[in-house]
Image (cartoon, rainbow, N blue to C red):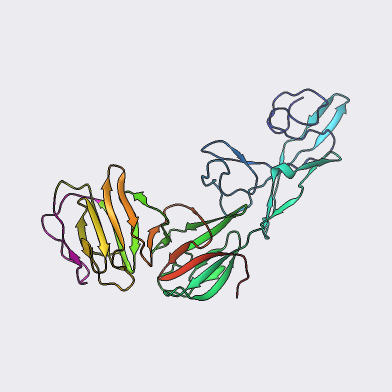
Amino acid sequence: MNCPRCFREIPAGIKECPHCKAIVNRGKTVLVASPVECEHCRFLNPPASVFCQECGKSLEVRAEVQAKREEIKHKTTEPRQAVVAAPEAVVVPPIQSKERISVQNISNTGGTAILGSIQKHEIQFRLLLLSESREIQDAFQIEDGANVGRQGCVITIPDSLISRTHCKFSRVGDSLFVEDLESKNGTFVRMKKNITLGSGAEIRVGQKFFRIEKTDIPQQSPASNSGETMVAFSFTVSQKPQYKLILLNEEKKVVQEFPLTGTLRVGRQEGEIVISDPFISRHHCEFQETPEGVLITDLDSKNGVFIRLTAPVELKENDELRIGMRLFQIAVGGSSK
């Protein structure tokens, strides 16, 4: 006889396929929850997985429970032979609560594979809306798949710089992830350690935005395209730089360009780039060209350096985000207002 799932030849009379572990039981209905295979490392994840538990890569289908149930009917014709009907797909409604199905919890009772115990999240996350002085203004419970936006979202924030559907939170076990949904102004996460970025990366320092790009040394300081006041800038050319910093306004228009020669320090009073901004510290951060890209170092600034997301990232307690012009922080436990 052949396995009803992988169609490989298997000995007659056995209850489980030795190849794909499908349940084989003649004459009775079998429900099987299929694991989700990671395209990157081929690890078999539980049906409800959003990210691979082995390599951390995002799976193809996100924000939905990926479990499938395949109904296979076996009609017995002879004691050691079975006629296997074609598999029939069964639509599984998405799980609405904070529950995940585990492949290891599938039990076999009376010839039918039953979805076993349901895993619930033990850790509860909250999204705190903060003022610029770090005072809590509001709090929101973060459920799996909760989206954030200006209108019609689970977490709605009235802000003209926030897109209608801006970003989304996902739960994988007791871990929390955030993903930008191609918003116009981006989702920024405060960096916790030095990081090296390449061309196209966007950084927020205080209320100012920078973008890293590859370039040659400009012949003269570029004129502002937005009519804004250009910031103080001084440097000495020692070698041909591979990168430059571009100062942007809120509409992402170019204000000024800075060739990255050696190390550029940004500060409110001192540094190669001096910006009059009350949210920028006296010595805020520095940018240094390396063979791998541009190394960014936060010089223990009060308000931090934020990096624009280009892929889902895991969040921990006390991590800070910038969505539009609003400041948020991740908290664990408690309840929303």
- Residue 57 percent coordinates (x, y): 51, 44
Residue 73, quarter of picture: top right
Residue that protrudes farthest toward the left in the picture: 219
- Residue 211 percent coordinates (x, y): 29, 57
Residue that protrudes farthest toward the right in the picture: 79
Q: Is residue 51 above or below residue 309?
A: above
Q: Which of the image's four quarters has the C terminus?
A: bottom right
Q: Nearer the viewer, residue 298 or 108?
A: 298
Across the whole image, how many numbered discs are drawn on residues?
0
Asked whether 216 falls inside the magenta stretch, the response is: yes
Asked whether, in this view, residue 144 is left or right of residue 161, the answer is right
The structure residue drawn at horizontal position 52% and vertical position 70%, both measured from the top left corner, is: 128
Asked whether 275 falls inside the magenta stretch, the response is: no
Q: Nearer the viewer, residue 303 or 73?
A: 303
- Residue 165 percent coordinates (x, y): 49, 65
The structure residue drawn at horizontal position 54% and vertical position 63%, both measured from the top left corner, is: 147
Asked whether, in this view, residue 332 is left or right of residue 160, the answer is right
Residue 236, quarter of picture: bottom left
Q: Is residue 135 above or below residue 89?
A: below
Asked whether, in this view, residue 167 is left or right of residue 11, the answer is left
Secondary structure mostly seen in magenta is loop
Residue 9, quarter of picture: top right
Is residue 284 something that shows in the picture? Answer: yes
The structure residue drawn at horizontal position 42% and vertical position 75%, both measured from the top left corner, is: 133
Is residue 152 something that shows in the picture? Answer: no
Q: Which residues are magenta?
A: 214-237
Q: Is residue 262 above or below residue 188?
A: above
Asked whether, in this view, residue 197 is left or right of residue 233, the answer is right
Q: Which of the image's four quarters has the N terminus?
A: top right
